[in-house]
Image: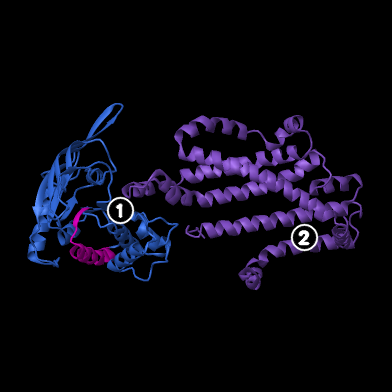
Amino acid sequence: MERLGTLEVKHLQKRYRTRNDDLTVLDDINLTVQPGEFISIIGSSGCGKTTFLRLVVGLEKGYEGEILLDGQKLNGPSLKRGVVFQDHRLLPWFSIEKNVGLGLKHPKSAESRKTIQEHLELVGLKGFEKHYPHQLSGGMSQRAAIARALVNRPEILLLDEPLGALDALTRMYMHQELERIWKQEGITMIMITHDVDEAIVLSDKIVVMSSRPGTIKKIIPVPLARPRDRASYDFVKIKEEVLEEFQLHTDYPFTYTI
Amino acid sequence: MSSIANLPAVIRNRYHGFISFLFLLGLWSAASHYNLFSREYLPTPVAVVTAFIRLLSSGQLCISLGSSLLRIIAGFFVGTSLGFVFGAAMGVSQTMEKLFAPLFNALRQVPVIGWIPLIIVWCGIAETSKITFIAIGAFFPILISTFEGIRSVSPSYVDVARVFEYSRFKLLSTIVLPGALPGIVSGIRLSMGTSWLLVVWAEINTRSAAGIGDLLTRSSEGKKADVAFVCIIVIGIVACLINELFGQLETRLSSWRKSYR
């Protein structure tokens, strides 16, 4: 059986029409993501990366071009695609256990309970079943959100700056955790980020986007062995390559006028 | 059971509240001890306690309080049910909001007491008029808090529901209603407070055979200040207890909300 989780994006264009304005947010996006790949999309804020993610999730409608998952055109949200938002979006009135089970059809069945338990263990939240979101730290909440997104066994996990709100140390720890979960589940992951290090640590490929309109500027492969050493020569080399993309607009990126 | 076991803790946490009462009691005792005011205007604490025991043993107090409570329950039930239904409908559906919001906003501006003459004309001065009056008062707080409660549920949670392909019913039952619940309960609490206020008003304005408001009116006719004191204290205590009860319910239902304190 062929592995599921191939995402193909062809000539994707997204425009917002307001009364007196026609804003192109995304233009001619072409991207193929293989099953089990980890892709990062990096770009400055306002480049349409979140819009891209929302289109792939199916939360955003009305686009030109094609988005295909395993050859099938997307039609609204689906349990085949899990999402982790930047803010964890756990429902504050439910326990962690109930939150993780939100996507299951029968969360009270024995099978579901087992699945929930397995996923809590996967993200390292065993023992926090009965806790409420406000009792958890930011990193723990985000881990619960990851468990919730994975509980339906989606083919693709989409992460919208999942670690953006965490402090630097927690974030580095979460990189390890995310990599472990990705390996363990063998799932396709697409992550939006603005953290270059994060993208290089985790990804097989880095998609660099430019803004207004959002287009793919470059796709940079990261052929480094895992786990990756942030201080290694190759790592720094790739980092330079990515950073260079953001400074190409101007000849003198650091000039200013008074 | 646990609330009885926790009684010392309750006293320890709340004794500040009793201090102001004790202070007032002390002031009152001193004023009557030194005969600062005529007994007719300011009865002594002992006279009030005596009146209280007299009213209690004759059964008059219980009957009055009981009939007032029954009116409150009936009016409160009608008012909050209707308020909740309209509030929920307006919160969930934009069409309903557009249809009803202007009407209710206009009606809300009319002081509840302003309805009395009309209600007397329409419903007479029997039970119906009192219950209608309380229902009107209870209707608006719950209407607004239900509506606002539902509207305050963050759309980002609705995204979560869409990702998990929730039906409209499941969206309402898992996300909208639990999110709006603390607001709804505080609306119920407000409605209950208004109901208490209005039952006394209604009873004073449309005479009835029994009721705490009637007891109060009759005390003024016979210049019985001690009875008036008993009524006022009883109204205060019962209202306080009910408010406390709903407060507890509210705290329990919104324990997931982090308070600023």
Q: Amino acid at mark 1?
A: Gln
x and y percentages locating residue B199 in the rendered image: 74, 45
Q: Residues within 10 Å of mark 1 (few under 14, many from 20)?
A: some
Q: Is residue A200 left or right of residue B147?
A: left
x and y percentages locating residue A47 in the rendered image: 21, 43
Colour of chain B, in one word, is purple
What residue sits right under mark 2 in the picture? B24
- Identify the image quadrant of the N terminus of chain B: bottom right
Colour of chain A, in one word, is blue
Q: Is residue B204 left or right of residue A39?
A: right
Q: Vertical placement of A55 versus A242: above or below? A: above
Name the residue at 74% across, 33% down.
Answer: B123
Q: Vertical placement of A22 versus B85: above or below? A: above
Q: Which residues are magenta?
A: A168-191
Please tell me whether mark 1 sits on a helix, a strand or a loop. Answer: loop
Q: Give the letter of the chain under mark 2.
A: B
